Image (cartoon, rainbow, N blue to C red):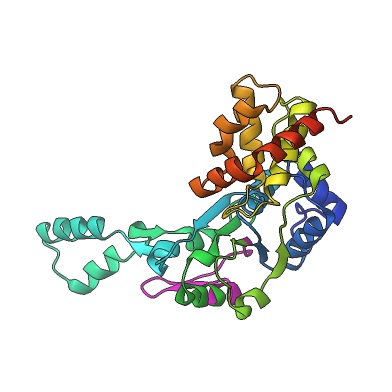
Amino acid sequence: MDTALPQSVDETLELLRRERYVADRALATTLYLSLRLGRPLFLEGEAGVGKTEVAKVLAGGLGRKLIRLQCYEGLDVASAVYEWNYSRQMLELRFAEAAGEHDRGRLAEHVFSHRFLLKRPILEALETPPEGPPILLIDELDRTDEPFEAFLLEVLSDFQVTVPELGTFRPEAPPHVIITSNRTREIHDALKRRCLYHWVDFPDVERELEILHARAPEAAASLARQVVAVVQKMRDADLFKLPGVAESIDWAYALLALDKSEIDAETLESTLGVVLKYQDDIQRVRQEHRDDLLARATAAKDEP
């Protein structure tokens, strides 16, 4: 067992807090079990609730290398696992032929060697650095298609990759895998069964205030209360994209940059684009929710 890993749920919570990540005990428990049992952790939830950040703070807290595979539509094995450096191979072949080497077998053996292999995130994660197994973040898996999902299921089953020209790559110890999904589509049950699962929800008022204090400590308590109150109220609105915790932090820093100590009507109007990312949502907030948001900000400012 990797002795550098947290040895309890409480130690896991403390590791996250040291890295300024405020988690509830349920998330810390699932993360601890993922590390202890060597199972991938599948985090699902709305964009901006802190799923990706779990992998980042875990790598930072353990002093491990973070390897990130950002998923997108059309992602294939060449981009995710490995490919050959074809341009360099062609140059090498020309140099060899110019030097009088014409044995095709020897040429092929030479150019299909480790020197010309381009390791992508999954293959890179199968190497174990001196500090220990890396953290492999497979981010936004729901953006890929089912064929890649099926390939990933195979990789997670045995943590090995075969390169026909070189053989099979197996790590000394498997990486710690964290998979995230914004649930734009459902991930196949077979892959989920390989993982431990946790739904990352929007935080309540108290926890979001704690997050803001950890991530934007420069913000005065009254301003932080206003930011959290208004963002929490926005999440009750019928918006296309609800603001996440990341937007709360961004808004606090934006207000600090503008030397604002409170959220008034002008400030709200001029900074909505920090919190909301769609024009329809901005228009709806301005037309239907502006007064309620300002009233909530005023009430929060005066709270003890």
In this picture, is 261 found above or below 286? above
Residue at 13%, 68% in the rendered image:
102
Residue 196 in the image: x percent, y percent? 72, 69
The quadrant holding residue 256 is: top right
Residue 13 in the image: x percent, y percent? 82, 49
Whether residue 118 is visible to the viewer of this picture, yes or no, is: yes
User: In the picture provided, is 232 more to the left or to the right than 79?
Assistant: right
Residue 125 in the image: x percent, y percent? 54, 59
User: In the picture provided, is 60 more to the left or to the right than 301?
Assistant: left
The residue at the far right in this view is 304
In this picture, is 197 found above or below 11? below
Whether residue 8 is visible to the viewer of this picture, yes or no, is: no
Q: Which residues are magenta?
A: 154-178
Q: Which residue is nearer to you in this view: 230 or 135?
A: 230
Q: Which residue is nearer to you in this view: 142 or 81?
A: 142
Magenta run includes residue 283? no
Q: Which residue is nearer to you in this view: 40 or 272?
A: 272
The quadrant holding residue 18 is: top right
Magenta run includes residue 165? yes
Residue 58 in the image: x percent, y percent? 69, 50
Quadrant in the picture for the N terminus:
bottom right
Number of on-image labels = 0
Quadrant in the picture for the C terminus:
top right
In this picture, is 90 found above or below 53? below
User: In the picture provided, is 178 more to the left or to the right than 19?
Assistant: left
Residue at 55%, 65% in the rendered image:
184
Residue at 79%, 55% in the rendered image:
28
The residue at the far top in this view is 259
The residue at the far bottom in this view is 190
User: In the picture provided, is 234 more to the left or to the right than 68?
Assistant: right
